Amino acid sequence: MKFESQVVHAGDRKRVTSDAVPATTPISLGTTFYYETAERLDRIFGQEESGPSYSRYSSPTNDALEELTSVLEQGHGSLACASGMAALQIAFQAALLDRKRTVLASHAIYGATVKMLDQVFAPSGVEVRYLDICDTAAVAAAIEKYKPGVVFLESVSNPLLRVGEIDRIAGLSRDAGACLIVDSTFATPMLMKPLTLGANIVVHSATKYLAGHGDVLGGVVIADQEHFETVRMLSRIVGPVLGPFESYLTMRGIKTLAVRFERQCANACKLASWLSSHPAVERVYYPADPQHPDAETIRRLFARNLFGGIVSFELKGLDRAKVMQFMNRLKMIVPGTSLGDVHSLMLYPVIASHRDVSPKMRERMGISDALLRISCGIESADDIIFDLDQAIGLSSEL
Ligand SMILES: Cc1ncc(COP(=O)(O)O)c(C=O)c1O
């Protein structure tokens, strides 16, 4: 080979000849895969034989992450996507492909999901109806009335941490031929596994707890057998797949999910009880609270004695300007968007996650100008409380 060819080919495409296996899945960046014979490649392109051919269809690092997330959620198959929103988009599209184009959605959901339903799906002919998903009788009546193709909810809602009766809603959806899609980003598979409760498709923003370190944007769609083939078929055509480096980081993050999440839940529990007795705090939202409106459902559906790493709360009598001054005073907790990271994050929903939701819809969701959401990190709970205490103390002097 000439030098010009050597620089292109030497060292690449080494076949693994020994039986050595890397203990941790490596990052596999190649987009194109070839085989001994064109006939074999033909069978792989034709999906008569499994194997990678082109990374829009599948690639070794993504395959490993997909197998991992499928196991965690007990799904038939999983697709690693470029973001949580890309994962949601493909989940809805797959479910609506051969069903009535009506979505019955919880009104307690992430702002961008409302925007996607209203500004992407609705203009293309999908009818979107919102309702209180925690009122199971109302859900039953709406399913009967609208005969939706899809029912959608967040297993633990953003940001007020409401929990619907997924198992009963799954039964109602199944009887009506609708697909139940659950965004389980806040719950993680440690609080509940919606597919085992009868849901058809589960979506995560892997950006949050799964990857867990604030350095990956990603999503996963995990589906039952009926829906997974459609999810994969759409992905092969449209290509919203995660890059291999992000797949590697997400897998690396998931290895510590159990220990991170347990600490985050313990910190959140301590923080919620501290906030509940603080005179400057109007109201605390946390699933461990026996007064939580969905306490009975939480007791029934949450898998362990864990209640999540997020606490939302309202500060007494603070308007937007004062809430922002309070946020400016935080010294350790990061005031920003996102959640689920190892560091604690404070989000102000009206300027971030629910900024583009209309004030009327925000009111319906119960999101006021005084509401804040904290995602507990893995720091010492004492330091999280100390930081909040000094910021609240200074704010009350405003
Ligand atoms: C509940 C929920 N679902 C989906 C998303 C979207 O995820 P991503 O930002 O990875 O697209 C978010 C983002 O905050 C979220 O909170």
Image (cartoon, grey):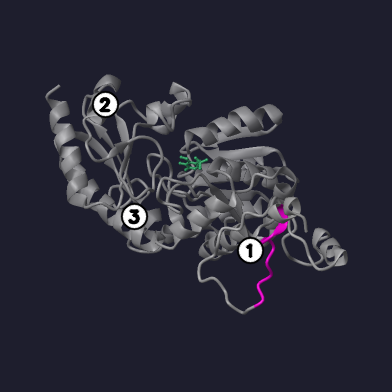
Is residue 250 toward the left or the right of residue 125 in the image?
left
Task: Name the residue beneath numbered marker 3.
Answer: 307
Tell me what residue is drawn at x 47 percent, y 23 percent. 358
Q: Within 10 angstroms of label 3, few (less than 14), some, or many (20 or more) residues?
A: many
Q: Residue at horizontal 44%, vertical 57%?
A: 253
At x 49%, y 50%, the residue is 206
Locate the N terminus by quadrant: bottom right
**Could you tell me how far apart the alpha carbons at marks 1 and 3 are, in whole angstroms?**
27 Å
In the image, residue 32 above or below residue 390? below
Q: Secondary structure at mark 2?
A: helix
Residue carrying label 1:
76
The dominant secondary structure in magenta is loop
Q: Which residues are magenta?
A: 8-17
Residue to which mark 2 is pinned: 323
Secondary structure beneath dot 1 equals: loop
Give the residue type that dot 2 points to: Val
| Mark 2–mark 1 distance (CA, rounded to whole Å) | 45 Å
Which is nearer the N-term, disc 1 or disc 3? 1
Residue farthest to the bottom, as pictured: 19
State yes or no: Cβ of the residue under disc 3 lies below 8 Å from any atom of ligand 1: no
Please name the amino acid that badge 3 sits on.
Answer: Phe
Q: Quadrant of residue 324?
A: top left
Mark 2, Cα crowd under 10 Å, few <14 / some 14-19 / many 20+, is many
Taking 7 as reference, is 333 left or right? left
